Amino acid sequence: MASCFQDVPWKLYSSRMISAWGDRMWMFAVGLFMVELSPSGSLKWPAIYGLTKSLAVVILGSNIGRWIDRTSRWNAAHISLGAQNVLVVICAVCVAVTFYFKKRLVAEADGWGLTAACSVIVILGTLAHLASVGTSIAVFKDWIAIIAGGDSQTLARMNSTCRSIDLATNMIAPIAVGQVMYFLSHIVAAVTIASWNVLSFFIECFLLWRIYKEFPNLAVKTSACEKQPLQVLESWEKESEPGDQPTADDANVKLESGNGFFAKRLGGFLKSWKIYFSHEVRNAGIGLACLYMTVLGFDSITVGFAYSQGVPESILGVLLAAGAAVGLLGSIAFPFFVRFMGVERTGLYGFSLEIACLTLCVASVWAPGTPFDPASVSISNIDNPFALKNSSRNSTVGSYEDGPESYTSVILLMAGIILARFGLWVADLSVNQVLQQVDDQIRGSINGVQSSMNMIFDTVKFLLVIACPWPQTFGTLVCISFSAICAGWSFFASYSFKKRGHLLPFHKVIDNILPEEIHQISVDLKNEKPDENTAVRRNNIPSSPEKKHDNSPS
């Protein structure tokens, strides 16, 4: 088994690298494809595509996770992977055909032909994204936890390596596909992405199959491979004591109380959310979701704001690379923190470091050169972008190309975002490992609902940006984002307090056993044949793995 384990990681990492490369190429290219297909290069179709993806994950994320819980690991992995690659190939081919016949589609029925083509691309791309969510949960949430064999440090190292691969491909893959689109054409780029997905599917399937065969524990999934009906979760709710957590037996309940197809899907949706919100990892997951409700990251919103403040494209590219490098350092440092501090304390330090760095962003709101001036945004000039552009007291009264009078504000903003990437990825990896260490019978449901939670908060962010879209109100978004991240720390801290008994940074766990019970346990341990069940009850240790699993010691 030891030699088998040593042989597994390189296959897992190779599969992750191939998958991440294809995902990053597609994610970068599809946005540019949609802009190019939109009338006059508007952001209409990219916005529709992004909103559709988010809503789809919110609605179906929990059902995807529940399906993974009820399906054998190999079937869940290769079906999700196959669906993802097939849908991306079909979507990329549709993109190539649309570009080839673009003029004819624009002339067809007053442009309705192009609208129909874009709608098909959005639908296929959304389905491919849902399949990608399934692949991520099945392999990199579930498989990786089983391969680690319950060792928290091993799991931390594997999570760190996979995340480092993600960050590295996120830097390199867009450059590669961008060169193809610039020097050749969009059609060639679409065909290249389709070809990559066809080839990568067979390679990934081969690697995953070898892992599956080399690690027999992946084939063991209690009641997951069997088509047994599930009992209703309310039976657990009625019989359990307050504060009890749902276990594997509680997950194996009949979620379909209705007879119809939609009734079953709705029942599964509601029960997955009940499992999530009744589990002890709930607050940790909400803390992670809060990190998605922020403009303090290198997304299109913050990049666009920095560009509007006079930061040129070349400097923005360097800043993005610097942020990715700092995030990569956080990912690499994560397993070392877990080794010496445990997952819970590592998460607290990650959240705290992120908040400390983002105080620079809050300071930038009132620093010299800031465009923050919400009073200038009035009903009389909302429809006059030139008035809004020139109304700030601190920024330049010229065009965007002139830049602000002082770059202090934007420098503080970018510095805070870059430095915060270290704590961000440490916190992100900590929470994800907590979610991986739940019982394997509900791991899919928990992580599926978590994907939905992340997208809910991400959608709220976009709604806030729509409500405050001007540079003069960007400071408001910065303050709201900082508050959301502080709320995320509070939620994770409450989870850590329940697990560790305190929030002190240099201690692991406070022993809550009474002194007289400690004396009695010490007497029992001196006996030749101690009463095992008594010791188990006093230490609150599950007597059998089927009834209760310990998530992760701090």
Image (tube, rainbow, N blue to C red):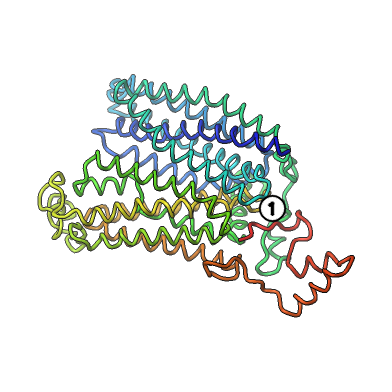
Q: In this view, does 61 lie to the left or right of 271?
A: left
Please give the name of the residue rendered at 56% of the width and 64% of the height, measured from the top-left corner. Answer: 495
Question: Which residue is at a point 30% across and 20% down the rendered structure image?
Answer: 104
In the picture, measured across the screen, residue 131 lies left or right of residue 370, that is right
Please count the marks in the image: 1
Q: Foreground residue, 158 or 440?
A: 158
Q: Which residue lies furthest to the left in this view?
A: 398
Q: Which residue is drawn at 53% across and 70% down?
A: 504
SS type, badge 1: helix
Residue 78 coordinates in the image, percent (x, y): 61, 32
Q: Is residue 157 above or below residue 511?
A: above
Residue 322, image quadrant: top left
Q: In this view, does 410 lie to the left or right of 45?
A: left
Residue with the most extreme right position: 528
Which part of the image, by quadrant, shows the N terminus? top right
The residue at which mark 1 appears reads as: 251
Q: Which amino acid does label 1 sit on?
A: Ala
Which of the two residues, 261 or 95, is positioned nearer the viewer here? 95
Which quadrant of the figure contains the C terminus? bottom right
Q: Position of residue 141 (x, y in %)?
A: 59, 45
